[in-house]
Amino acid sequence: MIKTLDWAGSSLRGQNFSSWERGCFLMAIVVKKKRGESKIELINRFRKIFLEEGIIDQIKEKVHYVKPSRKRYERKKEIDYKNKLDQRRLANG
């Protein structure tokens, strides 16, 4: 199902987006400047929130399709690697 996304004053007004594309565009982080806060501190606060939300990962997932079998393979590989590290830590004390 395709719906129209309307944002006042937006260049996206009137264009059609599928549901997964709307999810990308509706992610908004609002950071208001606090009294006495420098521009650098404001940017750093925005960056910290941006990274914690995992927006980059979500966008990457939606840009390139990854087969479910590949996702399972990657997840299993990651778990095996973490288990291997834990065994090394236990062996070394």
Image: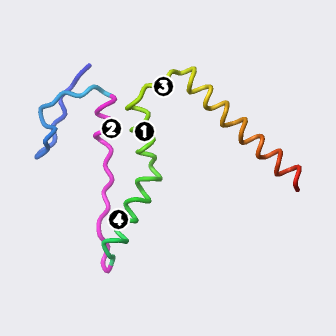
- For residue 6, the mark is none
Q: Kindly report the distance in space between the C-alpha atoms of the residues bearing marks 3 and 2.
A: 17 Å
Instruction: Return the disc, 4 or 2, that comes first in the chain's sequence.
Output: 2
Circle 2/circle 1 CB separation < 8 Å: yes
In the image, is residue 61 part of the stretch drawn in magenta? Answer: no
What's under tag 1, amino acid-wise? Gln
Q: Which residue in the protein does label 2 denote?
A: 24
Location of residue 75 in the rendering, given as x and y in whole percent from the top left corner: 62, 32
Give the labeled residue for mark 3: 66
- Where does the image place residue 20, in percent across and percent down from the top left? 34, 29
* Mark 3 or 2: the one toward you: 3
Q: Position of residue 8 (x, y in %)?
A: 12, 44
Which mark is first along the chain, 1 or 2? 2
Amino acid beneath label 4 = Ile
Residue position marked by numbered label 1 in the rendering? 58
Residue 43 marker: 4
Count neighbours of disc 1 (C-alpha within 10 A) and say few if under 14, some if 14 to 19, many if 20 or more. Answer: few
